[in-house]
Structure formats: structure tokens, C-alpha cells
Amino acid sequence: MPAPVKGSITVNGQSIAVTNPDKLLWPEQGITKRIYLEKLAALSPYLLRYCRKRLLTVIRYPHGVGGMSFYQKNAPDPLPSFVHTYTHDKITYIVLEGLPELLWLGNLAALEFHPSLHYIGSELPCEWMIDLDPSREVEPRIMEAASIVGRVLSSLGLTSVPKTSGATGVQIIVPVNRGVTFQGLRTIGHFVGRFVTEKHPDLFTLERLKKERGDKIYFDYLQHFGGKTLAAPYTPRARPLATVSTPLTWQEVEKDVAPADFHLLNIEERLRSIGDLIEKVPPQPVEELILRLK
């Protein structure tokens, strides 16, 4: 058996060990660890924006997509000197602040990045995120559902940004001002969710139990709690096609784009062309609507 290949790269003055750079992480796409680290570096200005100062959970696939995997909340031991941690509810989380930490995690075959919905040391949400969760593995109506929710939010005076989860679902993000609470977002989320389920009962459901949903799309407004996580914008996903959770324009949603259209092999070109769609939207007056509902 040949000896494992090892090396290192230096980023921002930090030396990061790289093991088995030719290991296939996404076999169907031919993406090796070496290619993955290159793609992570390209994604870092965007991905880090939604991971910094948050509690980070990663999903690691030591043998690549299709192999065994595990969620990692607690930081492994030992840690490089440049990796910092934060303890919350007896869990010692990695604090993902820069490219060295990101590439270090990439070398550990962390293929997905799921940050908390709040910043470290805060009990307030960073944004409002509606999760549209299909009950079927292939859901041809997911963009139709997203479009309906987007139009409802627009009718309420809110600008929002849809994004693919990178798997089967879609999340809709509304930037918020500091001071909005998780409870407030659950209140307005329930209002919007009840409205779309009453208007489109064959498409949406508020039923949490998957076995009771049939083929309907779950409008998840209950995800907003401290410590909960969702796939970060621009995180890769451990799916065969190496999809990336990608913000969309509403025009793309209307054209019924597929989540599989956005992946590690084409995301750089997209970002060079249109940049970060979420960053372009200012905080929305969600608190005014919450007050009206109260």
C-alpha cells in the first residue's frame, strides 16, 4: 500500500496540513480534496460572511460523499493554534473567522457548514429564514412554492432573497434589524405560513411530522430558536452533484431553476458575475409587522 501523501499550504501566515489531496470527495464530479480546497478558498469571502461569530456545526465525510459521515459540534482535540473556540450549553464550538480555519476544516473533509441563526453571546436572530422543506426527494413544485411565499412577503412590504438549500429545499431570507426576537419571527412566520397553507392547501403544510405531510411542502416557521442551525448560504452540500446552497433572483425562481444547477464547478463564475445577492438587501421592517400582529 502506498504511503499517504501529505503536504501543507500557508495562508495568512498560518501553515495548514493537507493530507491525501487526491482523495475523491465527490466521485461523480471528479472533485478531489485538492480541488475542494481551491473551491473553498474561492467561496470564502461569501461563505465566511454567514459563518463568522456564530456557533458552527459541520458535517464531515472522511471517505467522501457516499461514505460514512458525522455531525461535529464539539471541536476536535488537539486544535491548531489559529483555531479558536466558544463554549455554549456545554458544547465547545469552532469559531470560523477566516480562511485558515476554513481550509483546515476542508482538509478534515468537512463538506457542509451549518451556523447558528444567532451570533455568539446573543439571543437575537441574525436574519429571518423561512425553510420550505419538501416531503419528496424530488419536488418539481419547490420553485412554485418559493414564488408564492415571495409574493406574499412582497405584499407585506418585505424584500427577500430565495436560496437553494443545496439539497431539495429552498430557504427564503429576510434581513432584519437588530432587536427582532426569535419569538417575533415565529409569530410572523406562523401568520405567513397559515396564509399560504389556507390559500394553497394542496401545496403547503404546517405539519411537522414528515409521515403526516403526504406530498406537501412543509412551511417551517418553527426553526427560529437559539442553537438551531440551517445550511449557510454558499455552503457546499454532500450530494452527488456537489451542489452549493445558492442565493437566487426571483426571476430565476420564476424560470423554475433546479437546485442542481448550482454546484462547486460553476459557482465561482456566478459569484464573479452577480456577487452576493443577500448582502445587497438592507434590513427590512419586520418589527413593524410583528407589532401589528400583536
Image: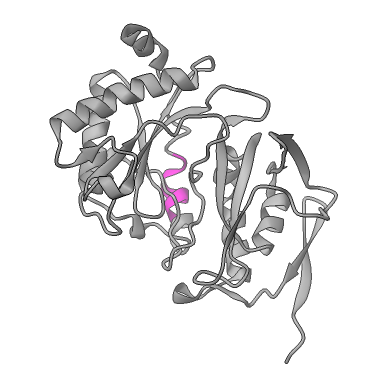
Image: 175 above or below 179 = below
Residue 124 belongs to the span the image colors magenta: no
Q: Which residue is drawn at the image coordinates 16% and 29% (left, top)? A: 198
Tell me what residue is drawn at x 23 percent, y 21 percent: 155
Magenta stretch? 269-276
Q: Position of residue 22 (x, y in %)?
A: 63, 77
Q: Would you say the magenta stretch is mainly helix, strand or loop?
A: helix
Which residue is more in the foreground, 235 or 45? 235
Q: Position of residue 289 (x, y in %)?
A: 34, 12
Residue 216: which quarter of the image? top left
Q: Is residue 153 visible?
A: no
Q: Is residue 293 visible?
A: yes
Image quadrant of residue 194?
A: top left
Which residue is drawn at the image coordinates 57% and 64% (left, top)?
Answer: 69
- Quick one: quadrant of the C terminus? top left
127 up-or-down from 97: above or below: above
Q: Residue at x 32, y 24 (%)?
A: 190
How did the renderer colour the structure? Answer: one colour
Q: How many marks?
A: 0
| The quarter of the displayed image where residue 40 is located | bottom right
